[in-house]
Image (cartoon, helix red, strand yellow):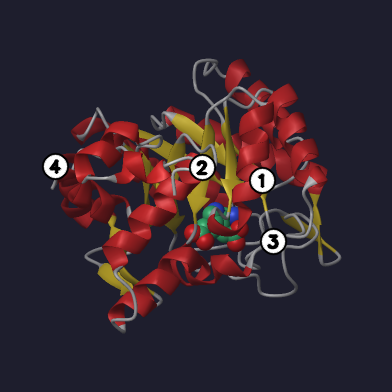
Amino acid sequence: MSDLNFDRHRRLRSSDSMRALVRETHLRTEDLIYPIFVLEEEGQKNEVPSMPGIYQISLDRLSEEMDEVVSLGIRAVLLFGVPDVKDSVGSEAYNDEGIIQKATRFIKENYPDVLVVADTCLCEYTDHGHCGVIHDQYVHNDESLPLLVKTAISQAKAGADIIAPSNMMDGFVAAIRKGLDDSGFENIPIMSYAIKYASAFYGPFRDAAGSTPQFGDRKTYQMDPANRLEAQREAESDIMEGADFLIVKPAMTYLDIMREVRDRYNVPIVAYNVSGEYSMVKAAAQNGWINEQQIVLEKLTSMKRAGANLIMTYFAKDVAKWLKQ
Ligand code: PBG
């Protein structure tokens, strides 16, 4: 063998300690943002059938979830509201006494160190399930913007630390930035769902949030999964409009996109490990087909390796537990 010239890569894989020494990517509990579905109806904690371990939880029981989050060292939660009433313009989204506003106040009063990220969208609050105002079966861009701005301001007033607009109307970052600034919230950052694909991986979420579109789909506002250059245009607009973070969503099937935005922009990049990605792992794990812990850690580590700084994930509590061990 001595006449062969090759590199011995295995030298640096010889033991646990050696592998730890040369590891390039690290997953930390501080990287995780945990999504919570807050139900307006009282006294409820309902497991979402397609998302084992994830609950719709009412405000009066939110402390159960928050105590656990805090004890595990998770520092940020992403709130989604499941309101009692819906209408065509999503009024509950921007009601100062709406479920998200109440949940935000509750968390900031009782768990002041946990960052509240408010998902700013209308689909959970509209009776048609679309993310904006409808005209002739079409989601109207410019008429939807003021409603999003009102929602963001109302969320900021309630104490939200970060505004995360997810509805994919053009100009939403510019509109929300101006709205927040004009209302004295110039210090509240915007975590924009800049790159959000029209994905079948959101299916279980729509069960959890009750936000399935009642007609059509979201393809006129969310992106075509086939497009890569378009992702750069979306990211560029949001950066110019003042986004402080860029979200790439879904995560697992879009790691190439994550790497490209990481390389091109200098803001924190957030991976959204969405509901369908969660459900697939859970289902396979429940069947005993995969090792859940190893699969989840490998997936999330891959997102960080692809350039994500932060990860929104329904696995946050599990991962925090595993990282503690
Ligand atoms: C709201 C919103 C959605 C998700 C996050 N915010 C659903 C959608 O666009 O249909 C999906 C999250 C997930 O699947 O986990 N617009």
For discs 4 and 2, the disc positioned in front in the rendered view: 2
> How far is mark 4 from mark 2, CA to CA?
49 Å
Ligand 1 rendered quadrant: bottom right
> How far is mark 4 from mark 1, CA to CA?
34 Å
Q: The disc labelled 1 sits on which kind of residue?
A: Ile
For discs 2 and 3, the disc positioned in front in the rendered view: 2
What is the crowding at mark 2: few (fewer than 14 residues within 10 Å), some, or many (at least 20)? few
Which is nearer the N-term, disc 2 or disc 3? 2
> How far is mark 2 from mark 1, CA to CA?
34 Å
Give the residue at mark 2: 6
Q: Tell whether label 1 touches label 4 (CB within 8 Å).
A: no
**319 up-or-down from 281: above or below:** above
- Mark 3: which secondary structure? loop
Which is nearer the N-term, disc 2 or disc 1? 2
Tally of numbered tags? 4
For discs 1 and 3, the disc positioned in front in the rendered view: 1
Residue in the foreground of this view, choosing between 101 and 294? 294
Q: Is residue 27 visible?
A: no
Give the residue at mark 1: 257
Give the residue at mark 3: 198
Give the residue at mark 4: 71
Which is nearer the N-term, disc 4 or disc 2? 2
**278 up-or-down from 248: above or below:** below
